[in-house]
Image: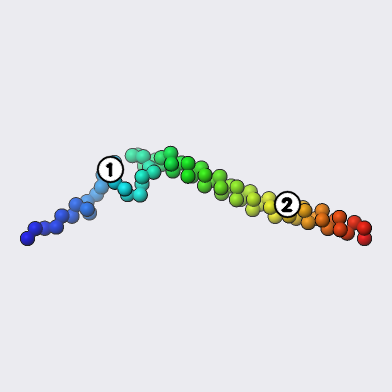
Protein backbone atom coordinates (compact mmCIF):
# COMPACT_ATOMS: atom_id res chain seq x y z
CA UNK A 1 0.00 0.00 0.00
CA UNK A 2 1.39 3.40 -0.98
CA UNK A 3 1.19 6.44 1.21
CA UNK A 4 -0.74 9.43 -0.10
CA UNK A 5 1.27 12.39 -1.23
CA UNK A 6 0.73 15.50 0.86
CA UNK A 7 2.44 17.87 -1.54
CA UNK A 8 -0.65 20.02 -1.82
CA UNK A 9 -0.31 20.89 1.87
CA UNK A 10 3.31 21.99 1.61
CA UNK A 11 4.18 25.67 1.73
CA UNK A 12 4.06 27.30 -1.68
CA UNK A 13 6.90 29.46 -2.85
CA UNK A 14 5.80 33.10 -2.73
CA UNK A 15 7.46 33.70 -6.10
CA UNK A 16 5.46 31.04 -7.92
CA UNK A 17 2.96 31.86 -10.63
CA UNK A 18 0.14 30.05 -8.86
CA UNK A 19 -3.30 31.67 -8.74
CA UNK A 20 -3.54 32.32 -5.01
CA UNK A 21 -5.56 35.54 -5.16
CA UNK A 22 -2.50 37.78 -5.09
CA UNK A 23 -2.10 38.15 -8.84
CA UNK A 24 -2.27 41.95 -8.62
CA UNK A 25 0.79 42.07 -6.34
CA UNK A 26 4.40 41.90 -7.47
CA UNK A 27 6.99 39.51 -6.07
CA UNK A 28 7.79 41.66 -3.04
CA UNK A 29 4.24 42.06 -1.73
CA UNK A 30 3.76 45.62 -2.96
CA UNK A 31 0.59 46.38 -4.92
CA UNK A 32 0.95 46.26 -8.66
CA UNK A 33 -0.28 48.85 -11.17
CA UNK A 34 -3.74 47.27 -11.46
CA UNK A 35 -4.27 47.44 -7.69
CA UNK A 36 -3.08 51.05 -7.58
CA UNK A 37 -5.45 52.02 -10.40
CA UNK A 38 -8.36 50.41 -8.54
CA UNK A 39 -7.34 52.17 -5.33
CA UNK A 40 -7.16 55.57 -7.04
CA UNK A 41 -10.57 55.05 -8.68
CA UNK A 42 -12.15 53.97 -5.40
CA UNK A 43 -10.62 56.96 -3.59
CA UNK A 44 -11.94 59.32 -6.26
CA UNK A 45 -15.44 57.82 -6.04
CA UNK A 46 -15.38 58.00 -2.24
CA UNK A 47 -14.50 61.70 -2.20
CA UNK A 48 -16.98 62.42 -5.00
CA UNK A 49 -19.73 60.76 -2.95
CA UNK A 50 -18.75 62.62 0.22
CA UNK A 51 -18.73 65.93 -1.68
CA UNK A 52 -22.16 65.29 -3.15
CA UNK A 53 -23.54 64.20 0.20
CA UNK A 54 -22.26 67.42 1.77
CA UNK A 55 -23.15 69.94 -0.93
CA UNK A 56 -26.53 68.73 -2.21
CA UNK A 57 -28.42 69.25 1.07
CA UNK A 58 -26.80 72.66 1.49
CA UNK A 59 -27.87 73.69 -2.03
CA UNK A 60 -31.40 72.47 -1.34
CA UNK A 61 -31.63 74.67 1.79
CA UNK A 62 -30.35 77.69 -0.14
CA UNK A 63 -32.86 77.10 -2.95
CA UNK A 64 -35.75 76.66 -0.52
CA UNK A 65 -34.87 79.92 1.24
CA UNK A 66 -34.94 81.86 -2.05
CA UNK A 67 -38.23 80.20 -3.06
CA UNK A 68 -40.04 81.09 0.17
CA UNK A 69 -38.60 84.60 0.21
CA UNK A 70 -40.01 85.10 -3.30
CA UNK A 71 -43.39 83.55 -2.39
CA UNK A 72 -43.92 85.60 0.78
CA UNK A 73 -42.37 88.89 -0.41
CA UNK A 74 -45.77 90.48 -1.10
CA UNK A 75 -47.35 89.60 2.21
45 sits left or right of 64 in the view = left
Residue at the spot 64% in from the left edge and 53% down from the top edge? 53
Residue at the spot 27% in from the left edge and 43% down from the top edge? 16
Q: Position of residue 60 (x, y in %)?
A: 73, 55
34 sits left or right of 74 in the view = left
Q: Tell me the colour scheme of the image.
A: rainbow
Q: Position of residue 36 (x, y in %)?
A: 46, 41
SS at badge 2: helix
**Of label 2 and label 1, which has the lower sequence position?**
1
SS at badge 1: loop
Rendered image: mark on residue 44: none
Q: For mark 2, does the 10 Å Cα neighbourhood hold few (<14), some (14 to 19), or many (20 or more) residues?
A: few
Residue at the spot 11% in from the left edge and 58% down from the top edge? 3
Pointer 2 residue: 59
Pointer 1 residue: 16
Indicate the quadrant where residue 34 lies: top left
Of the 4 image quadrants, the one containing the N terminus is bottom left
Q: For mark 1, does the 10 Å Cα neighbourhood hold few (<14), some (14 to 19), or many (20 or more) residues?
A: few
Q: Position of residue 57 (x, y in %)?
A: 70, 55
| Alpha-carbon span between mark 2 and mark 1 | 54 Å
Indicate the quadrant where residue 25 lies: top left
Residue at the spot 22% in from the left edge and 51% down from the top edge? 10
Total number of numbered labels? 2
Indicate the quadrant where residue 75 lies: bottom right
- Foreground: 34 or 57? 34
Amino acid sequence: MERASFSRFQHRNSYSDSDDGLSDMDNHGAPGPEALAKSKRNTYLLFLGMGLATLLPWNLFISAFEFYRYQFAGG
